[in-house]
Image (cartoon, grey):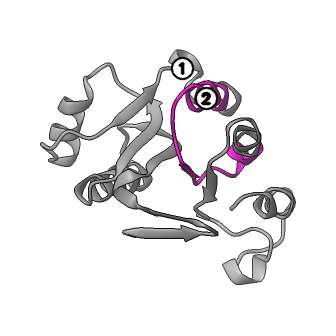
Amino acid sequence: WRSISWGSTNRCCATMRVRYLHHGLWPSPSPTTTFVTWNCMGFTEIGADYELVTVANSDRAVPEVLATEFGIRQPLRVRLLRAGTFRRSHRVVYLLAFVHFLFSRWDVLITRNLGFLPWAVLLRRLRGGRVLFEAHDFFTDPELRGKAHGPTARKQGKREQRWIPRID
């Protein structure tokens, strides 16, 4: 992903400000924590201006967590949202992330959190930039997932149908 072309814009990844929101706790034993951290490492290694925005689950400093939990000694930009006892609350975390992104500079915002898409669409309207959704699950067509229809899947499917067409 060295070069991206959207319309008349063709910018090298090294000059793009890429921000990635992950609502998971950091650090945690979850595989997604490892995935998003190494994703950050990959973007950093190719010279991207990349920041991982995630939820603090420890008082330890970022370099210490990187070294002890992931074996990474290279400095990475990890912005920890400190929500205290509300760290598992989607509304609180999304509000903190929204304020952070509203007042920071970015060209591309990536999230894997379907619930953040309404916030991301508003951010794009207010300040521009591109919003990308990294689909982790796909609820619109349950047959593709091999799972039974249920109220949660239908609700998530409706969210996908409403918000995904509004992003890049």
Mark before the other along the chain sequence, 2 or 1: 1
Q: Position of residue 41 (x, y in %)?
A: 27, 53
Q: In which quarter of the image is the C terminus?
A: bottom right
Kindly give the residue lying farthest to the front in the view shown: 8
SS assignment at label 1 = loop
The image quarter in which residue 145 lies? bottom right
Q: Which residue is drawn at 79% across and 61% down?
A: 160
Question: Which SS class for mark 2?
Answer: helix
User: Separation of disc 2 and disc 1 at Cα?
Assistant: 7 Å
Give me the disc on residue 19: none
Range covered by the magenta-colored residues: 93-118
Identify which residue is drawn at 39% across, 48% down.
33
* Residue behind mark 1: 83
The residue beneath circle 2 is: 93
Q: Which of 29 and 110 is in front in this view?
A: 110
How many numbered discs sit on the rendered protein? Answer: 2
Q: Nearer the viewer, residue 150 or 133?
A: 133
User: In x, y percent, where is residue 98?
Assistant: 64, 30
Q: In this view of the protein, which residue sits in the foreground, 156 or 48?
A: 48
Instruction: State the image coordinates of residue 136 (x, y, percent, origin top left).
Output: 58, 64
Q: Residues within 10 Å of mark 1 (few under 14, many from 20)?
A: some
Q: In which quarter of the image is the N terminus?
A: bottom left
Residue 126 is one of the magenta-drawn residues: no
User: Are the residues at dot 2 and dot 1 in contact (C-beta closer than 8 Å)?
Assistant: yes
Q: In this view, does 81 lie to the left or right of 159?
A: left
Above or below, comparing residue 84 to residue 44 in the picture? above
